[in-house]
Structure formats: C-alpha cells, structure tokens
Amino acid sequence: MRTVFWDYENHQLKMIDQRRLPGALEVYSCQTCEETANAIRNMLVRGAPAIGACAAFGLALAAHQSTATNLEGILADLENAKSVLLISRPTAVNLAWSLNRVMGVTKGYKGSVAELRALILLKAQEIADEDVIINQRMAEIGAELIDDGDTIIHHCNTGALATVDWGTALGVIRFAHEQGKRIHLLVDETRPRLQGSRLTAWELEQYGIPYEIISDNMAGYFLKSGSVNKVMFGADRVAANGDVANKIGTYMLALAANDNSVPVYAVVPISTVDSSLENGDMIPIEERPQEEVLDIYVNGERVTPVGARARNPAFDVTPNRLITAIVTEKGVVYPPFERNLLEVLK
Ligand code: MRU
C-alpha cells in the first residue's frame, strides 16, 4: 500500500494516518486543500517526499473544489491553495518543490478549465509515481555501500511511510537486506515524536530486518564501542554546500560517528537539494508545540511538572564536513559537495 494515493473513484486524497501507527493501520481521507494542509501540519503524513506528494495532490483537490468557470478564476484559487499548503511545514523543501512543479502546468496555459483540472491531477500523480522509482534507484545505488554483517544506526523514519513508497535511507537498507546481506539495525527512537520506535520499528517488523531500538542518547555509547559500521539517515533539505537538515538529533549522531571514524551517509532524492541556499544556516527550522516534548506519561503519570516549559526545534543541520557521502538517484556524491552536488544537479 502507498503512504499517499489518489482515490479516483471518490476524488479524494488518501493517506496512511501515521499518528495511529503502530497500533492501527488506518487510512485518512482529505476532500479539500485545507484538510490536506492540516494533515501535513499535524503530521498524519510526514517525511519530506511524502509531504511533497501530498501537497501536490492537495493542489489537485483545490482544482477539483474550485467553482471557477474561467481560467482567471481557477488560477486564483490554485495560487491561494498553494500559499495555504506552502506554510503547512517549513523545513522540507520537497513541499515547495512539488507545489512549484504542479503549478508549472499553469504557465502559459490556454486550454479549458476542465482540462486544467485533469492536467493538475496528472502532474501530481506523476510526482507520486516518480518518487517510488527514484527511491528504488537510490536503494540500488546505496546498497553498494552496505557490507554483509553491518550494524547500522538509523535516525527517524525514512521508510515507505516517509515517502510515497519504498523509502530513502531505510529503502537502501531494505534493498541490501533483500540482496541477502545480513544487517542489524540500531533504531534511534527519535524523540520527541518517536518516529523511530513507532514507525521505523513497525516497518522493520514487516520486512523481517533484525533491529533493536535505542534511545537517542545511547548512540554515542554504541559508536564508541566499535560495534557500529555505518550511520544512515535521510534529509528534509540539503543546501548547495551539502549541509544536511534532518530530524533533530541527526547532528549529535553525526558528531559522535565522526569522532569514532564511522561513515555517515545521507540518502536524498535530488528534489530535497535546495541549490538556492548556499549553506545550511539558511534553512528554516520548524519549531513545533512544546507539548510534544512535555506530554510524556509513565505509569499513567505525567513526567514533567505542571508549569514546565520546553523547546522543540524539529530539525537540525549537520555540517557537510560530518557527512561521508550523499546518496542520490544520480549516484553517490562525495566531498567536496560544493562542487560535486552542483555537478549532479546539472
Ligand atoms: O518531522 P518528520 O517526521 O516529517 O521528519 C522526517 C525526517 O526528518 C526524515 O528523516 C526526512 O524526511 C527524510 S526521510 C524521507
């Protein structure tokens, strides 16, 4: 099943409700662009490529919802929808990338309103289908970096759930596992939303890949012990110089890996590279509600005292010097990223 897909019978956007996993596998339906933006904001759907595909279908919903009878009217409705979707989550550049790509079909368009509606949906579907092919290509390329017997630390969820299907970093690991390589995964639980222990562990159960969950602050211990061969994660935005914005905690993980000479790989579709940003300091970092950090319950009791305050940046930026290589659908990119990423983008 795809994480995000279009229901052609009912003209609805459907997605796996990731808030319910691993307890229940439920499908949520969006009928409007606003519902889609809310689903992204509230993380029913999350992961950079999945968000991108979802936003593209959000525009298809807006086109379908629009009551405009002329081109001017529907274009205004689409621009409005684009701005609603664009602000739903700020860090993953795939969101803006896919919205711009869908809106590209309106440039110089002179046909009928009905035809434009169909074209928008076609483009959104194309983005979703391409995502699966790109992930499978990255998986083939990236699996070459994995050796039989590797123990890998993985951060957040980068699997089928974070994309339309298959996954980025977890897709590489899954491919290597299917090639028969014996892999053991240490799954960072990924505080505060626990994408690792909830979603990655759930996916690994389906694929039969051996794993153990570790709390994020255990990664340094395992890296220093010499028992970890690689660190692998995805990205929400990569600057032109190869600085990588990814789920909070990635930077600390990469630091500890470098201190112990363990290679660090980011698996990233080209759509996640933002060549308009010179370096990672320019990447907007989403700050989410403090309740995500504070609302922890143990034995039915809230852990944090009444009145406690928290900070909750959802992403951090790992400087390019800590990244061994970036796996893309066009090949593995090594430093100097300033030059080699640009080469791949051409
Ligand atoms: O806040 P999330 O769960 O959307 O963050 C997701 C990540 O940080 C992933 O690692 C990233 O999107 C790359 S995986 C496709």
Image (cartoon, rainbow, N blue to C red):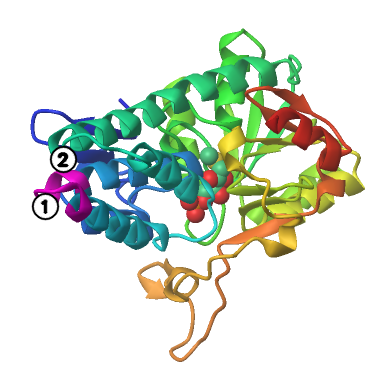
Image side of residue 125 versus residue 217, left or right? left
Left or right, 179 with respect to 126, comes to: right
- Can the viewer see residue 234? yes
What's under tag 1, amino acid-wise?
A: Ala
Q: Where residue 279 sits in the image (x, y, percent)?
A: 76, 56
Q: Secondary structure at mark 1?
A: loop
89 and 140: which one is in front? 89
The residue at the point 53 percent across, 23 percent down is: 134
Magenta segment range? 63-73
Residue identifier under label 1:
68
Question: Residue 58, which numbered label?
Answer: none
Whole-angstrom CA distance, mark 1 to mark 2, is 8 Å
- Tell me the quadrant of the picture where the C terminus can be found: top right
Residue at the disc numbered 2: 113
Q: Which element type, helix, strand or loop, lies under badge 2?
A: helix
- Amino acid type for the residue under numbered disc 2: Val
Q: Residue at x 25, y 58 (%)?
A: 76
Please say if the residues under marks 1 and 2 sit with CB atoms less than 8 Å apart: yes
Identify which residue, 143 or 213, lies in the foreground: 143
Question: Residue 51, how many percent across, how many down?
Answer: 41, 46
Q: Measuring from the top left, give residue 245's x and y in whole percent.
A: 66, 53
Q: Residues within 10 Å of mark 1 (few under 14, many from 20)?
A: some
Q: Earlier in the sequence, mark 1 or mark 2?
A: 1
Residue 71 falls within the magenta-colored stretch: yes
Instruction: Check residue 85 for magenta coloring.
Output: no
Task: Say which residue appears at 57% left-offset and 30% top-offset.
Answer: 170
Residue 340 against residue 291 in the figure, above or below:
above
Residue 59 is situated, as x and y percent measured from the top left of the image, at 28, 46
